[in-house]
Image (cartoon, rainbow, N blue to C red):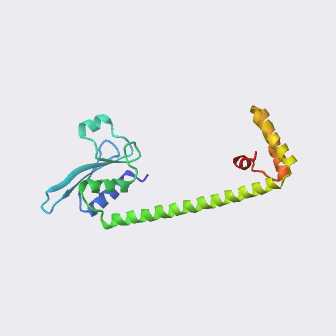
Amino acid sequence: MKKIDDIANYVHRHLKAAGASCELHYSSHGTSVYIFASSEDEDGDILAGPIKIRVSDHDLPPTYGQMHGWADIEVGPHPEATSDWLVAVKAALKALDLQPAAITRQVITRRANEARKAAELRRKEERREAAAAERRRRRVAAAWKALDNGAKKAIREAFARADERTGKARKRALRAARNKLAAKAGIHDWQAMRNEGLL
């Protein structure tokens, strides 16, 4: 998370750009920064707000909140807060019935594009992994199909014996069964065999 001052300045700048009346106040007891914002008409009459935004790296002590009032929007890593300054800006603009300024819309658009590209990369990776899994499945199925019935029976019995055991004995028996599968069929992915119901 960025520095508290930087985040507070981001929020303040974007609210000001949208036409909000904003003031920054720095806590004399810690690292918190408060932003008091409202929307006003041309005569200075308040149309919405004021709202209090608290940017901090820690929870507000309950006694302090009870004495001085809680923030309408919390920004930071602590519970009940958003760690994203843009989320705070959107919430504040909604509370003040203001529209995002051009600089805010640019950030929203950039983030949306980044999210879209990240989603495309994830889908591409998922397709790649699915294709690789399908190739493995086909190789395993073809190798198993090529075995004679006697070899298949011996391999299945070896894995069945392993399943009957526990602890170190099971590990040894499973290792022997895997070695038999690799030696007879050239298959090393025994888990794929079980997924296919072949063992």
Q: Residue at x 85, y 48 (%)?
A: 149
Q: Residue at x 75, y 32 (%)?
A: 166
Which part of the image, by quadrant, shows the C terminus?
A: top right
Number of marks in picture = 0
Furthest residue to the front? 149
- Residue 11 position in % (x across, y down): 32, 56
Viewer-closest of 119 and 81: 119
Asked if one can make out residue 22 in the rendered structure from this viewpoint, the answer is no
Furthest residue to the left? 43
- Residue 108 position in % (x across, y down): 38, 63
Q: Residue at x 34, y 63 (%)?
A: 104
Viewer-closest of 177 and 57: 177
Viewer-closest of 187 and 53: 187
- Residue 83 position in % (x across, y down): 40, 50
- Residue 87 position in % (x across, y down): 36, 54
Residue 42 found in image quarter: bottom left
Would residue 102 be found to the left or right of residue 138 on screen?
left
Would residue 135 be found to the left or right of residue 156 on screen?
left
Asked if one can make out residue 178 in the rendered structure from this viewpoint, the answer is yes
Would residue 25 be found to the left or right of residue 181 on screen?
left
Residue 64 found in image quarter: top left
